[in-house]
Amino acid sequence: MYRSRNMRQPFSKGFFAGGVIAAAMTITKGAFPGGHWTQEDDAENEMQIGSAAEKYPKPDNELTFNKLDSVFLSGNATRDDAPNHIRIQTRVPREIARTWVSMCPAQVYEIPDEQLENGAAEVDVQVTASNCVQCGAITAKGGHLTLPEGGDGPLYQET
């Protein structure tokens, strides 16, 4: 009988021990080591927003592109009038909003400039669902991604 296992859980024991356990799980098709593994919810973990984004080079439009140009170049043909398929609470703590903004590769989530400047603990998040490339980043911290329009996702064009 084939038992599917989450390979992330063994790596909580360290890289080498996790590698051995994950290999054993793969070879035995999940029969070894058996039992249930505990797993903590990602949404409960403390977040830290670093300053790595400040070190990124400015887009040169030859090798590197800004977020919106990257969405265009991906060939995403989502209609601008498609219904919003992203389910989030729009008034959230500043740290969560900043996480969504930094994790999203398509500039779907934005914090209005006036709210960035006022230093409030909670901010309103603006959602541009038509930019979404279905990467799933929103699910890391409290959002829910549903497939738009009955299971249809972005339609990528061949170039």
Image (spheres, rainbow, N blue to C red):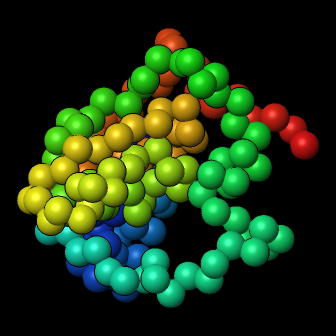
- Is residue 30 left or right of 77 when viewed as pictured? left
- Picture layout, residue 109 above or below residue 129: below
Residue at image x 23%, y 38%?
A: 90
- Picture layout, residue 133 above or below residue 30: above
Q: Quadrant of the C terminus?
A: top right
Image coords of residue 65 (percent x, y): 70, 65
- Picture layout, residue 78 above or below residue 139: above
Residue at image x 30%, y 30%?
A: 87
Q: Residue furthest right?
A: 159
Residue at image x 32%, y 80%?
A: 50
- Is residue 132 left or right of 38 when viewed as pictured? right
Q: Quadrant of the N terminus?
A: top left
- Is residue 137 left or right of 46 when viewed as pictured? right
Is residue 21 among what the camera can see?
Answer: yes
Q: Nearer the viewer, residue 18 or 118?
A: 118
Q: How many marks?
A: 0
Residue at image x 76%, y 40%?
A: 75
Image coords of residue 14 (percent x, y): 28, 82
- Picture layout, residue 30 above or below residue 49: above
Residue 80 figure quarter: top right
Q: Nearer the viewer, residue 41 or 57?
A: 57
Q: Nearer the viewer, residue 103 or 19?
A: 103
Q: Nearer the viewer, residue 10 or 147?
A: 147
Image coords of residue 3 (percent x, y): 37, 42
Q: Residue furthest top?
A: 150
Is residue 25 among what the camera can see?
Answer: no
Image coords of residue 115 (percent x, y): 23, 55
Residue 146 figure quarter: top left
